Amino acid sequence: MKQVLIITGLILSSLQAEAFRGVEFSIPSKDLKTHITGQIDYPTADCGPEKLPSVLIVSGTGFIYRDGFAGKSGTERDYIYRDLSKRFTQNCVITVRYDYRGVLCDIKAKEDGAKCIDQKIRAEVTSENIQEDIESVYLYALTQPQVDAGRFGILGHSEGTYNVAKLVSEKRVQPKTLLFMGAMLESPVTMIRWQMADRIFEYMFELDANKDEVLTNEEIQAGFLTSNLIIFGKPDQFLHPEGSWKKEEERTLLRSQYTQYRKAVLLEDDKAPYITNSFVFASYKYWKMWFSETTPVLRLLADFQGPILIHNGDRDSQTPGLREQAYLQKYNWKIKSHVRFNLHPGKGHGLGNHPLIGPIDEAIADQMVQDLKTALE
C-alpha cells in the first residue's frame, strides 16, 4: 500500500504569498491502517495574543482533498476550502484542513483519479472511520500551542454536518460553535430517498411549462440547460421513449425504483467495494448507512448548547435550503442550542449560483467567517 509521508512542520512554499502560513501534518489513523494528512493554516498578520480562535473544516461526500476543488470559474476560488481558509486567517482565525483517507490530491478531471486515489484504502472506508479521522484531526489540532481550545469551532459541509453531529452527540468532539454550509438536518435515510426519487421527480416537473401534469420530451429539451436537472449531465436520460411522462406515473416509478435499489444495497456484503465513476469510493458498509440510518442530524445535536450557524441555498441540489429550514422549524423546540438559519436565494450546495458546485459567493463566504469569529469570541 503506497503511503505519502509528510514531515510535520513543513512550511508550504507555494503559500508564502497567501494570508496564511501552511504547516502540513501527518498523523496515524486510529485504526493504524493509514495516515491522515492535512495542514494547519496560521495567520501571517500580527494577531496579538499567543493563542488564537480556530476552525476545523469537515467536508462532505466525495474524494475530498484539503483544498476542496469544487468549481468551474477557472480561478483560485474554485478551491473552496482554501479560499475559506484565506478569509479565516485574514481575520486571525487558525484554520485546520485535512484530506480524506486514501485521497492524495484534488481531482480536477477524471484522469486525475489514478494518481489521486488509493483504492485499497478507499475500499475499507466506513462512516465509522470517517468519523474517527475527524476526531483524530480535532484532537491533534487542540495540541498545537497557538490553538485556543476554548475558542474552537467546526465547519461542516453537507455530509460533514452528519459526521460532526454524530461526534458531538457522543461527546468525542466538543467545539464551542458549529458552522454548517449545505447542512443536512434530517436523517441520511430521508435525505437519500429525496435525492434518488423525489428530487428527480420535482426537477423534471419544474419543466412542465403548461402545468398540464404531462411532461413532454420537447419541454425537457427546451428547459434543460437552465434547470436544476443540469447537475445530471445531458437531457437524453430523461426523455420518454414514447414522447411524454405523466406526473403520477413518474412519481410512482421513481419511488418504486428507489425501493428496489435500497433492498439490493442492503443485501450487499459490508466489505464489498462500492464503486462510483469507475473508482472504489468506499466499502458497502459506508453506502448502506445512507439506507439504514434513521436518526436526524438535529436529534444528534439536541444537547449541544453552543451556537449553530447554518448557511443553505434555496437552489441547493443536495440539501435544499427550504426543505432543511422547514425541518428545523418543525424540530426546533427539541434543541438546546440557538440555531440561526441563513437561507440564500438563488444559491446552491456550494453557495454559488450553480445548484451543486462553487465557488462560494464572496459576500456569503465573508459572512460565514464573521459569523464564526463572532460566535467564538
Image (spheres, helix red, strand yellow):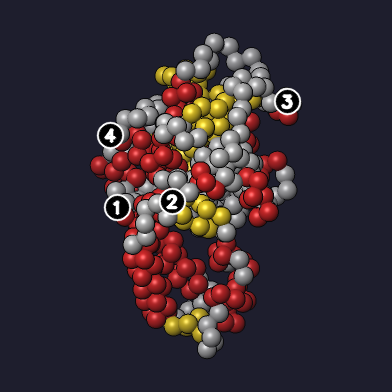
In the picture, measured across the screen, residue 211 lies left or right of residue 185, that is right
User: Distance between the Cα atoms at labels 3 and 4?
Assistant: 43 Å
Q: State which tag comes first along the sequence, 4 or 2.
A: 2
The mark closer to the camera, 3 or 1, is 3
The mark closer to the camera, 1 or 4, is 1
Q: Residue 274 or 342: which is nearer the viewer?
A: 274
**Extreme front residue here?**
1
Up-down: is 337 above or below 182? above
Q: State which tag comes first along the sequence, 3 or 2.
A: 3
In the picture, measured across the screen, residue 168 lies left or right of residue 246, that is left
Q: Position of residue 242 (x, y in %)?
A: 52, 89
Q: Which residue is mark 1?
A: 294
Q: State which tag comes first along the sequence, 1 or 4.
A: 1
User: Distance between the Cα atoms at labels 2 and 1?
Assistant: 20 Å
Q: Position of residue 167 (x, y in %)?
A: 36, 35
In the image, what residue occupies the spot 29% across and 43% down? Answer: 299
Q: State which tag comes first along the sequence, 3 or 1.
A: 3
Up-down: is 354 above or below 263? above
The N terminus is located in which quarter? top right
Q: Which residue is mark 4?
A: 303
Q: Amino acid at mark 1?
A: Thr
Q: Amino acid at mark 2?
A: Ser
Q: Which residue is mark 2?
A: 283
Q: Amino acid at mark 4?
A: Asp
Q: Which residue is mark 3?
A: 13
In the picture, measured across the screen, residue 259 lies left or right of residue 5, that is left
User: Distance between the Cα atoms at labels 3 and 2?
Assistant: 36 Å
Q: Position of residue 204 (x, y in %)?
A: 50, 72
